[in-house]
Every structure is written in structure tokens, then in C-alpha cells.
Amino acid sequence: MPVRVSVIVPTHNRRELLLRLLESLFRQRLAAEEFEIVVVCDGVTDGTIQSVRTLCERHPRLRLIEQAQAGPGAARNTGARAARGHYLAFTDDDCIAGECWLEQILLAFEKNDAVAVQGKTTTDRLTRTPLTHQMEVLSSWPAALPTCNAGYRKDVFDKVGGFDESFRFPHDEDADLAWRVEELGKIVFAPDAQIIHPPRRDGFWRRARWLRGLESEFLLFYKNKDKYRKYVSPSPWWTIYWKVCVIGQIHLAKSSCRYLLRPFRPDYFIVGIGLLLARWFNLIRFFPDYLKAQSFYRSSVGAR
């Protein structure tokens, strides 16, 4: 039977989390012969490759691709090029797929004649801390189509050229792809295509330096100013220094203060406030980098 959908999973040194995801994919209600799983090891050094090879012996629809580290966007493109399915389903190695995930993605495609599908992503709010990364998408999100739970028709994905690998940071490349695909057809939200994105512990300095990736806002803006203004904000500067520096920091302060109430975790409060101050510092520190990014992308992309 032909493969209907290919699941593309990029991974980099998250062996245990990847194995958890794969177990959830092996439990899909969709018939095993109707889908394949393509794991792209992107510069992996932690033993993931050996573990996946062992699983491949028991699961013939599981495929392994190795490449030098090039980032998640490039890894997804590698997986898409090797995919045999009519549809592509993307998720991340730190996620857990609901049993009906693929079944519901296919239903959304066929029922709506869609070119792309965005599924519902939930998290465990009770285990979040200032040092965890999680994603939650509970309704249609036109500003992006997060790759933790996204599906594309393969012919459409190929036609637009896949993910733009010129995004230096893993930020905004999903929105850029969705906006290009949107020009070719309908993107629908499928609430029953569910992915769980449990909070994943991250390092303090990694959380603080995340702001460096906001350079990508300038590339996204100059590639499609109209959609950026429609879906995101009037400009990258507004995004960085209002939506992140003011609104985002207020949310971080509020969430940190709740640890002084219930549950009482003063350590999380201190970490949260420290992260807030570190991010304010980095918003000043990275200002020259943002200026350089604006100048570079305005001349290289905006002039096209």
C-alpha cells in the first residue's frame, strides 16, 4: 500500500525525548502501512542514532537519516526530500502525539481540500517554570504554523521550496513557509489532530539569549511586509521592543510572582525575576545586532 503521510522529525541530542515521541507514533490508530516516520539526526552525538537503528529493525516504516548539524529547518527539508508520502506531517522530538493525530490530519486535508493543516497543541500548565520551554496552540494561529504540529501537501511544500534555510536561528521559518503556502490554497485548523508539548527544562542563559533569535523578525518582515503587518505587528522593532520587551516581560513578571503564592516556590520567583532582568539586558546588548540585521535584510531581501 502506498504511504499516505510521512512524519518528519528533526532531532539533535534529545535521545530520551525522541524515543518517547516515537513510542507515541507507533501507537497511532492509522494503519501502520499508511504512514512512515523519517527521523533526521542533525549533528547528533548522544547515542540517538544507535537507538533509532535498533527500532528500525522492529518498525520497517521507521527511517533514519543522518546529516551534519545544519539546524531544524534544514533537517526538515532533508526529511521532506526523502519522504514518500502524499502529505507531510511535522512534529518535534520533545512532543507526544495523540493516538488519532495522523488520522485527523488526513481527515482535515481531505475534508477541506486544504494545502496545509495546523493541529491543536497542548501542554501541562501545572509543571511550567521560568526555565521550561513549551508550546500551546489552542486555535487557528495565522501568524505562524508551528512545526510541532503541522501538515503540508508534499507537492505544495515542494513547489514553494520548503523551509527557507537562510533563517539563521530556529525562529520564524515556520511562519515564512506558512505565508508562502497560503498563497496556493487553504490552511485549516484541526482541533482533533492533537499533539502534547510537555514543558521541557532549559538552561537559564539559553532562555535569556533566546532574544538573539529575534534577528529573524527582520528577514520575515522584508520577505513579506504585508503579511507581517497583518499577522504580527507594524514592524520588527515594534515586535521586539513592545511585544517582547514590554508585553512579554510583564507576562514573565506576573507568572514569576505567582510562585510566591500557590505553589510557594520562592526559588522559581528569583529565577523568573533574574531571567526578566537578563532579557532586558540582552535587549540592549543585542540592539547593534538588530540594526545590522535590519540593514542586511533590507538591502538583500527588501530590494528583490
Image (tube, helix red, strand yellow):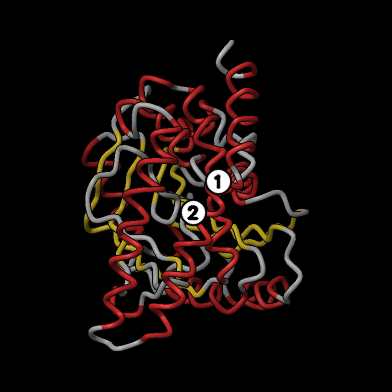
Asked which quadrant contains residue 272, the reply is bottom left
Q: Position of residue 134 (x, y in %)?
A: 40, 65
**Disc sitting over residue 167 in the figure:** none
Q: Is residue 91 above or below residue 166?
A: below
Q: Are marks 2 and 1 in contact (CB under 8 Å)?
A: yes
Name the residue furthest bottom: 264
Q: Amino acid at mark 1?
A: Ile
Q: Is residue 114 above or below residue 118?
A: above
Kindly state the secondary structure of the residue where label 1 is placed. Answer: helix
Point 46% across, 75% down: residue: 271
Point 49% across, 41% down: residue: 172
Q: Position of residue 66 (x, y in %)?
A: 73, 58
Q: Is residue 74 above or below residue 46?
A: above
Point 30% across, 38% down: residue: 142
User: How many numbered markers are drawn?
Assistant: 2
Q: Amino acid at mark 2?
A: Trp
Kindly state the secondary structure of the residue where label 2 is placed. Answer: helix
Would you name the residue on which mark 1 appears?
284
Would you name the residue on which mark 2 appears?
280
Asked which quadrant contains residue 9, the reply is bottom right
